[in-house]
Each structure stands twice: as C-alpha cells, then as structure tokens.
Image: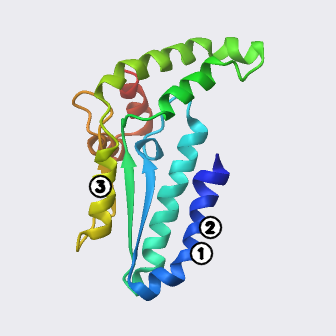
C-alpha cells in the first residue's frame, strides 16, 4: 500500500516537478479524511494518507519560491469500491484464528458502521469538481475537504474539532 499510495506520489512529483516549475503548473494530491482523522481497521491506509498530508505540506513550502500551488483533496464518504474491498479484506480472515478472534467484534462493528454511513456517500463527481477547482482557480485552497463522514458530519468540521480537542476526548467522542 505504501508503494502505491506514498512512493508512487513521490516518484510522480519527482519526475514532473521540473516541468511543473517551467510551466507554472500545480500539484494536486488525493488524500482522505482518514489521513487526518484515523478510524479503526484501516490504520495502514490512514498512515499512507497521513504521509500524503506531510509530503504535500513539505512540497508547498519547498516549492513556494517558484509559485507552485500544492493542493490536497481530502475525500470523505465517496461511492467507490474501496469500502467493499476493505470490508472483504476484514471478513476474509487475513489473520490466523487467534488474531481474528481477538478483533472479530471490532471488525463486525466497523463493517456495520460503514454500511450505516454508506447512505451518506456522494458521487465521485464531487472529488472531480474539487480537483478541477484546485487546478483552475486563481487562488486554490491548500486543502479541499470533499464530502462528509455522515449525517451532519462534514469532514472539514471533524478535522477542525480533532485539532482542538485532546486526543483521548476526541477518541471517546468518535466512538459515539
């Protein structure tokens, strides 16, 4: 997962930055709200998206001298195959029996939680629109929060609340 989600982004940036510098281009990286607000059972995926956040922030300050805009799309609940594939991976027992039995309840709760939230997922067009904005707007945002994490839970608000609250309090509230 790191090979594609992180190292692939680094390699692409490294390959294209010389051309982007010459053409006053832009870089738009796609992350996820779980790169800011981690959730159960997707820790490795979250780590790759946290990495994209850090890489994008570093690129923004390193390339500022050349006026290269760096934007990050932070997707929330967007209709895609990733949830189904994640649930299949959890359900397929990619673990030995002892490991699976330790986490079985968490896996089942996570799958159930995601199925409930699926009703709030939005079309991938929302992410596409954010990318177009990041590429064409005169003053693009550095972060585009796309979609939500459920009813009355816009992803930008959840990210801001996480910044303000102590970690353990946020963790406790997230369980609710």
Q: Residues within 10 Å of mark 2 (few under 14, many from 20)?
A: few
Q: In the visual, does 88 lie left or right of 136?
A: right
Along the line of sight, the residue nearer the viewer: 143 or 89 = 89
Q: Position of residue 105 (x, y in %)?
A: 57, 11
3 or 1: tag closer to the N-terminus: 1
| Residue that badge 1 annotates | 15
Colour style of the rendered protein structure: rainbow
Give the number of callouts. 3
Q: Residues within 10 Å of mark 3 (few under 14, many from 20)?
A: many
2 or 3: tag closer to the N-terminus: 2
Find out whether the residues at labels 2 and 3 contact each other: C-beta distance under 8 Å. no
Q: Residues within 10 Å of mark 1 (few under 14, many from 20)?
A: few
Along the line of sight, the residue nearer the viewer: 125 or 38 = 125
Q: Secondary structure at mark 2?
A: helix
Give residue 11's mark: 2
Q: CA gap, disc 3 to disc 1?
A: 24 Å
| Residue that badge 3 annotates | 130
Find out whether the residues at labels 1 and 2 contact each other: C-beta distance under 8 Å. yes
């Amino acid at each position: 997962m790191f090979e594609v989600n992180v190292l692939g982004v680094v390699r692409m940036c490294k390959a294209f930055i010389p051309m982007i510098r010459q053409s006053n281009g832009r870089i738009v990286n796609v992350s996820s709200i779980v790169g800011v607000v981690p959730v159960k059972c997707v820790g490795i995926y979250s780590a790759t998206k946290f990495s994209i956040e850090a890489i994008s922030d570093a690129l923004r300050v390193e390339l500022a001298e050349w006026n290269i805009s760096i934007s990050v799309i932070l997707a929330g609940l967007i209709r895609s195959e990733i949830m189904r594939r994640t649930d299949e991976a959890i359900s397929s027992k990619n673990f030995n029996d002892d490991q699976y039995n330790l986490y079985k309840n968490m896996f089942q709760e996570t799958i159930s939680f995601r199925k409930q939230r699926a009703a709030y997922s939005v079309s991938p067009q929302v992410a596409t629109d954010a990318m177009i904005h990041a590429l064409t707007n005169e003053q693009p945002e550095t972060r585009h929060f796309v979609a939500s994490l459920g009813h009355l839970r816009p992803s930008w608000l959840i990210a801001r609340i996480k910044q303000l609250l102590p970690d353990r309090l946020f963790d406790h509230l997230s369980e609710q």
